[in-house]
Amino acid sequence: MNNLDLAKEIYDTPTPLKPMELYVFLDPLNMECWELQSVMRKLQIEYGHYFSMRVVLSTKLFNLNSQHKVSSVATDSLAHPVLASVAVKAAELQGKRAGNQFLHKLQEQLFLQTKDVSSYEILLEIAGEASLDQDEFKKDFHSVHTAKAFQCDLKITREMEITEVPSIVFFNECIEDEGVKVSGLHSYDVYITILKEMLGSETLNRQAPPSIEKLFTKFSTIATREIASIYNISLETAEREMKKQMLQQKVERISLPNETLWKAK
């Protein structure tokens, strides 16, 4: 497995040279949005040279009509479903990669460890696990900049008429063309087909996955099933390879009731 530069992640600044841009609409508390993350990781690794991505938070949990309401909820409530989305926007103020790490940690805590991520206290714990500056996170959580960023995401959701999450809107480099909206969670091959159609190509140049070591510099935790998918190997082979990495003290295992995660040491 040869190395691949994965510097352009979901939250990186879009590169104008890439012919496609994807708007990915997510609700952090939606299980299918969590499942989509794994699909998009693989898509990014294999075909990320064709597109840039922007994640837009599209929560249906709380219909906010003004920036004032966002600020008041974030400041005064110790627990509320909308706080998870506000926290992601606060994390993004420390960098797009930091926001991505925080979102992934939040979803791990919710779907794998069943923690209450509507709790401000739990969100502070997640910020620590995502290696954020917690003082900055606390300040940004209550800031007008975070409120405006969240309102911007909700505005984009309305303008693009997103009624279901997850959804992805594909845009090509021709600004006159309308985007292609794909609602719901689909198989990996569906997204590949759409990329081909919008690029007007029968085949795409698939990049090889990076080494395991390189992969863990980009993603803080990776599930066994994701490793199997990324390297196109069986779950048994992926488990065996990761055990080798663990014996070499390169990774540590995190065993959860419904998932096995791996983390670089």
Image (spheres, rainbow, N blue to C red):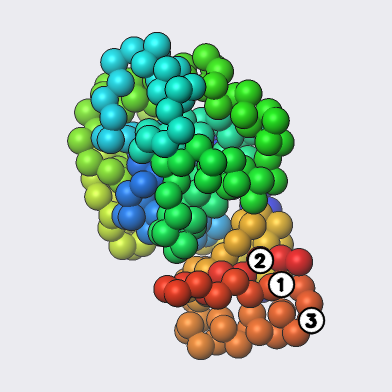
* Earlier sequence position, callout 1 versus callout 2: 1
User: Which residue is located at x 64 percent, y 51 percent?
Assistant: 129
Going 71% across and 36% down the picture, which residue do you hit? Answer: 133
Assess disc 2: are there few (<14), some (14-19) or many (≥20) residues with their C-alpha within 10 Å of its C-alpha.
some
Residue 111 location, quadrant: bottom left
Height in image: 37 above or below 225? above
- Residue type, label 2: Lys
Reading the image, the residue beneath label 2 is: 263
Residue 260 is situated, as x and y percent measured from the top left of the image, at 52, 74
Q: CA distance from mark 1 to mark 3?
A: 8 Å
Name the side, left or right, on which 121 lies relative to 33.
right
Q: Amino acid at mark 3?
A: Gln
- Front-most of 17 and 23? 23
Relative to 34, residue 51 above or below: above
Marked residue nearer the N-terminal end (2 or 3): 3
CA separation in Å, label 2 and label 3:
13 Å
Whether pointer 1 and pointer 2 mark residues with C-beta atoms closer than 8 Å, the reply is yes
Element at badge 1?
strand
Q: For mark 3, what is the residue?
A: 248
Q: CA distance from mark 1 to mark 2?
A: 5 Å
